[in-house]
Image (cartoon, rainbow, N blue to C red):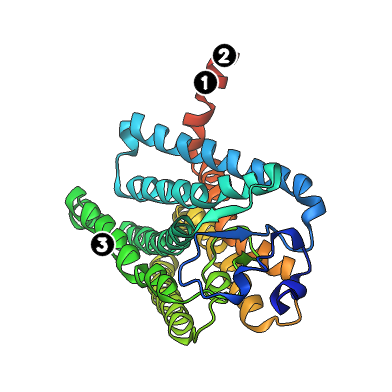
Amino acid sequence: MQETPFCLSVGHLLSFTMSDSNSTDVTNPSTFILLGIPGLEAAHVWISIPFCAIYAIALLGNFAILFIIKTEPSLHVPMYYFLCMLAVTDLVLSTSILPKILSIFWFNSREINFTACLTQLYFSVSFSTMESGILVAMAFDRYVAICDPLRHSTILSNPMVTKIGLALVLRGVILELPYPFLARSLPYCRTNIIPHTYGEHIAVVKLACADIRVSSYYGLSVAFFVVALDVSFIAVSYTQILRAIFRLPTKDARLKTFGTCGSHLCVILVTYIPALFSFLTHRFGHNVALHFHVLMANMYLLLPPMLNPIIYGARNQQIRDRMLQPFTHKGT
């Protein structure tokens, strides 16, 4: 039987094409086949090295952040509670996709259950939304700490921090819940081959042999709403922060105060710039190679979990001193 145009367009793993199932309606296929990074299959083993390093650093760094904050009473304040939320989000986000990616690279384990694929899809979008919301909460914490420091402990009390965290979780869970249900409702009768490393939303729904505009428009609307709303809140917070900083009498005081925001600003850039770059290349980079699209879709999910603990570990003196404490004790 003649191969499908889709398979010809990606041009690999012909042994995985479902020549028999291409001609039959499969409303919910039992499994999908993940190609990995199309066009770079021969280099998968080499590509796995940085991916594995990213995952190892993300695990060690975020668990270290959680351990340090838990065991250090002086860090039991709102800023570090939000940092704990960020660390947990990063751990779930990276663990939801990286083990499967590495199994593709190392063991050629390309099959993924249909339900597992949709679960991957849901976790990647929902926890990305939670992470964006946590950055807003951290910006609000910096705003209160700098613009209204005397009321900081009153405004951001432990119950309030808990409510903010719960609201961010519910926002991510509810806003992204239609994604897997919309994807599941579509009929898949062309192919079950996904030219990607994980169950990415657009890569999955493009396999459907039905109108995907509802799913596509919903995904675009939610992404635009979340990013526009969160970036706006962050921008307003930092506008007020900068106004307060410029009112300080000395340059040293201004630099010291602004330095308390440095880690958060770096994390914002690490989170939003790769995501924006991936979004723009996906929507407008029609002439960009497929493997580049896939790599960008991986990087915007994998880089923040690796870099966030490094940023806070390098820039935050309390966390840095706590991390270096075992080594400094050995040297004395």
Secondary structure found at label 1: helix
Kindly identify the amino acid type of the residue bearing the numbered disc 1. Answer: Pro
The alpha-carbon separation of the residues under discs 3 and 2 comes to 44 Å
Please say whether residue 79 is visible from this viewpoint: yes
Observer-nearest of 204 and 273: 204
Left or right: where 180 falls relative to 268: left
Secondary structure found at label 3: helix
Q: Position of residue 285 (x, y in %)?
A: 70, 80
Q: Earlier in the sequence, mark 1 or mark 3?
A: 3
The reply to whether discs 2 and 1 touch (Cβ–Cβ < 8 Å) is: yes
Q: Position of residue 289 (x, y in %)?
A: 76, 72
Observer-nearest of 117 and 8: 8
Residue behind mark 3: 167
The reply to whether discs 1 and 3 touch (Cβ–Cβ < 8 Å) is: no
Observer-nearest of 116 and 258: 116
Q: Residue at x 44, y 48 (%)?
A: 92
Asked if 316 appears above or below 6 in the picture, the reply is above
Number of the front mark, 1 or 3? 3
In the rendered structure, find residue 281 and report the number of the disc placed on it.
none
Residue behind mark 2: 330
Q: Residue at x 78, y 69 (%)?
A: 11
Q: Residue at x 68, y 62 (%)?
A: 295
Q: Residues within 10 Å of mark 2 (few under 14, many from 20)?
A: few
Secondary structure found at label 2: helix
Q: Earlier in the sequence, mark 3 or mark 2?
A: 3
Observer-nearest of 130 and 184: 184
Number of the front mark, 3 or 2? 3
Asked if 263 appears above or below 243 in the picture, the reply is above
The N terminus lies in which quarter of the figure? bottom right
Kindly identify the amino acid type of the residue bearing the numbered disc 3. Answer: Ala
The reply to whether discs 3 and 2 touch (Cβ–Cβ < 8 Å) is: no
Residue behind mark 1: 326
